[in-house]
């Protein structure tokens, strides 16, 4: 496994007084001053080798504290009621990027990670629909990823928001699967199209460990529920081959590409044709 230079920096920034920074409007300032950026990581169909999607990953490079990991600042943003501001910024940035890529002929859907709190926001589907209209981007170019923990909250608004998003034609993936405590009943009830198996299960597959049992089981479960299965954190060819043999539909991870800034991802995509499932949709 290669070191992730971004992640390395993030770990060093643990001592950042995040509570204070965010409580005092640090994230809003970060947005105004361009400290937030998005990197994109491809998802590749195992059978064909086609790039079938990208995941947008948020980066915060603070001018004093350096890289701050989303793993650290997202929970703080949630506690301080700032998460909707971030989600809305990410959604607009991604949809703008999709519009720009479409003009270049790059037709690939992009996934946005949502917080559980976003699913309690009734206005979210309307907000996304308005952005798609404003930037003339069809809904099939946007996917959403939500973690098990976020998805299993048994509240009516969450279900309504997910149903409305689904009616808009936006696909929703259950993210980091295997690390939470999913109710299988909820998994069946909610309109998920994809399961992303958490990277903690994938990293040891090349060593032929018992992790493969979990991968097999989750893959079969996903397929039986009519979902596509994505393996996250694929880091070597050996893992890739094992996961493909287990029936995973897509892979994502360093074996394919690390997350790249938009412009670098444009180049990567141009050099890694054939592209996407959206190629015929205009
Ligand atoms: Ca994700």
Image (tube, helix red, strand yellow):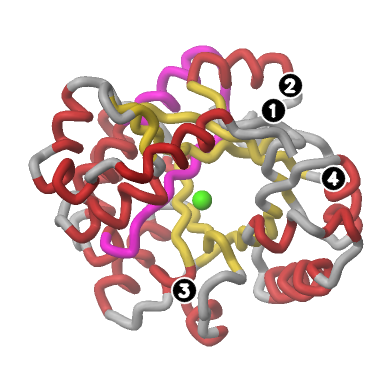
Front label number (3 vs 2): 2
**Badge 1 is on which residue?**
275
Residue 272's disc number? 2
Residue 190's disc number? 3
Q: Is residue 108 rendered magenta in the image?
A: yes
Left or right: 87, with 263 as reference point: left
Q: Earlier in the sequence, mark 4 or mark 3?
A: 4
Q: Earlier in the sequence, mark 2 or mark 4?
A: 4
| Residue stretch in magenta | 93-117
Seen at 46% across and 38% down, the residue is 57
Residues 176 and 162: in front is 176
Q: Earlier in the sequence, mark 4 or mark 1?
A: 4
Q: Position of residue 81 (x, y in %)?
A: 15, 56
**Badge 4 is on which residue?**
47
In the image, residue 47 sits, relative to residue 101, either above or below, namely below
Seen at 45% across and 51% down, the residue is 144
Left or right: 260, with 82 as reference point: right
């Amino acid at each position: 496994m290669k070191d992730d230079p971004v992640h390395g920096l993030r770990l060093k920034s643990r001592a950042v007084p995040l509570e204070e920074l965010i409580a005092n409007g640090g994230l809003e300032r970060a947005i105004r001053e361009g400290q937030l950026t998005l990197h994109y990581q491809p998802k590749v169909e195992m059978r064909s080798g086609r790039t079938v999607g990208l995941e947008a990953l948020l980066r915060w490079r603070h001018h004093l504290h350096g890289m701050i990991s989303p793993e650290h600042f997202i929970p703080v943003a949630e506690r301080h009621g700032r998460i909707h501001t971030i989600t809305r910024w990410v959604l607009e940035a991604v949809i703008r990027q999709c519009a720009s890529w479409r003009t270049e002929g790059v037709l690939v859907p992009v996934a946005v990670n949502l917080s559980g709190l976003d699913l309690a926001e009734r206005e979210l589907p309307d907000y996304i629909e308005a952005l798609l209209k404003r930037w003339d981007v069809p809904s099939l170019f946007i996917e959403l990823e939500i973690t098990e923990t976020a998805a299993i909250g048994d509240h009516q608004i969450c279900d309504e928001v997910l149903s409305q998003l689904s009616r808009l034609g936006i696909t929703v993936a259950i993210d980091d699967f295997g690390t939470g405590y999913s109710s299988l009943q909820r998994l069946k009830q909610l309109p998920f199209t994809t399961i992303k198996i958490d990277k903690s299960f994938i990293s040891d597959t090349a060593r032929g460990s018992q992790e493969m049992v979990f991968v097999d089981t989750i893959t079969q479960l996903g397929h039986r529920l009519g979902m596509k299965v994505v393996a996250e954190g694929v880091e070597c060819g050996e893992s890739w081959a094992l996961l493909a043999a287990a029936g995973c539909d897509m892979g994502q991870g360093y074996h394919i590409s690390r997350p790249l800034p938009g412009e670098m991802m444009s180049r990567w995509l141009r050099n890694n044709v054939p592209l996407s499932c959206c190629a015929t949709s205009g």
